[in-house]
């Protein structure tokens, strides 16, 4: 199974990706993980990315695509398939991935789009609080903290309304346009991401081929 997982920040992709990886026995490949692994391994693309990140610069598409190419060439991806998470983020990256897969004679099976309304995402993220002592994450509405830990909880800077709206705006401007790109190929599987994790997992399973 070779699939791409798309969804806005806070949609629950992390939880569902872990379940998909276990169900299909495929590697979970995320852009962040790939960058860190390539830098650590000292691959040519990793060295280039490491130098850019050390200077505080964004890693350009051609370097990201090169790192993805290196990762997809590894035996586990060749043998079992892959769940791509966080890539492609733009239409240009989607086109580059298409060319890469075509050159290897590989086809995607599905593009899973996890859909959650912006208002609910904002509510989910803005209500999160983390416990710096235990690492536990609570939610003021859905998973309230015990009274004895409330005083030490932290509201992360990227969980504010302003930060969430910026992240959502970036998603809609940059990543959402890849949906029609893949819809034209008949690959998109739209899944309602509202509800319990088990309910969402069941919907994804129903939407996927095989």
Image: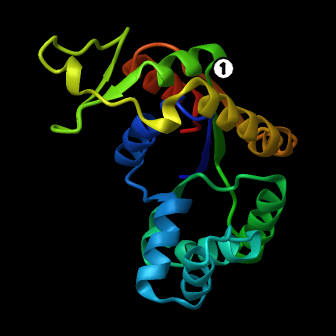
User: Seen in the image, is 27 located left or right of residue 58?
Assistant: left
* Colour scheme of the picture: rainbow
Q: What x and y, as percent, mark residue 161?
A: 59, 24
Q: What x and y, as percent, mark residue 163?
A: 61, 34
User: Seen in the image, is 173 located left or right of residue 153?
Assistant: right
Asked if residue 81 can be seen in this view, the reply is: no
Q: What x and y, as percent, mark residue 82?
A: 52, 58
Q: How many marks?
A: 1
**Residue at image location 69% in from the left, 77% down from the top:** 63
Please state which of residues 179 and 54 is positioned toward the viewer in this rendering: 54
Vertical relation: 110 (above or below) 51 = above
Vertical relation: 71 (above or below) 150 = below
According to the picture, the residue beneath numbered tag 1 turns out to be 118
Residue 155 figure quarter: top left
User: Seen in the image, is 200 located left or right of residue 121?
Assistant: left
Please state which of residues 161 and 23 is positioned toward the viewer in this rendering: 161
Vertical relation: 80 (above or below) 133 = below
Asked if residue 149 can be seen in this view, the reply is: yes
Residue found at the very far front of the displayed protein: 151
Dot 1: within a 10 Å radius of its alpha carbon, few (fewer than 14), some, or many (20 or more) residues? Answer: some
Residue 69 figure quarter: bottom right
Q: What element carries label 1?
A: helix
User: Seen in the image, is 25 located left or right of residue 64?
Assistant: left
Vertical relation: 180 (above or below) 53 = above
**Residue at image location 47% in from the left, 89% down from the top:** 42
**Residue at image location 77% in from the left, 61% down from the top:** 93
**Residue at image location 49% in from the left, 79% down from the top:** 38
Q: What x and y, as percent, mark residue 71?
A: 53, 74
């Amino acid at each position: 199974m070779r699939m791409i997982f798309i969804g806005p920040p806070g949609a629950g992709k992390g939880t569902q990706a872990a379940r998909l990886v276990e169900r299909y026995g495929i590697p979970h490949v995320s852009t962040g993980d790939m960058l860190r692994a390539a830098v650590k391994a000292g691959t040519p693309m990793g060295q280039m990315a490491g130098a850019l990140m050390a200077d505080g610069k964004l890693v350009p598409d051609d370097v990201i695509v090169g790192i993805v190419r290196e990762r997809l060439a590894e035996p586990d991806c060749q043998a079992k398939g892959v769940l791509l998470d966080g890539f492609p983020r733009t239409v240009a990256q989607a086109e580059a991935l298409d060319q890469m897969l075509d050159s290897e004679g590989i086809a995607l099976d599905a593009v899973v789009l996890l859909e959650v309304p912006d208002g609910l995402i904002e509510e989910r993220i803005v209500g999160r609080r983390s416990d710096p002592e235990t690492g536990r994450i609570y939610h003021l509405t859905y998973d309230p903290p015990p009274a004895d830990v409330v005083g030490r909880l932290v509201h992360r800077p990227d969980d504010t309304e302003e930060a969430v709206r910026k992240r959502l705006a970036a998603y809609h401007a940059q990543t959402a346009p890849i949906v029609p790109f893949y819809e034209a190929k008949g690959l998109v599987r739209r899944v309602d991401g509202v509800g319990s994790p088990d309910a969402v997992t069941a919907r994804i399973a129903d939407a996927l081929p095989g």
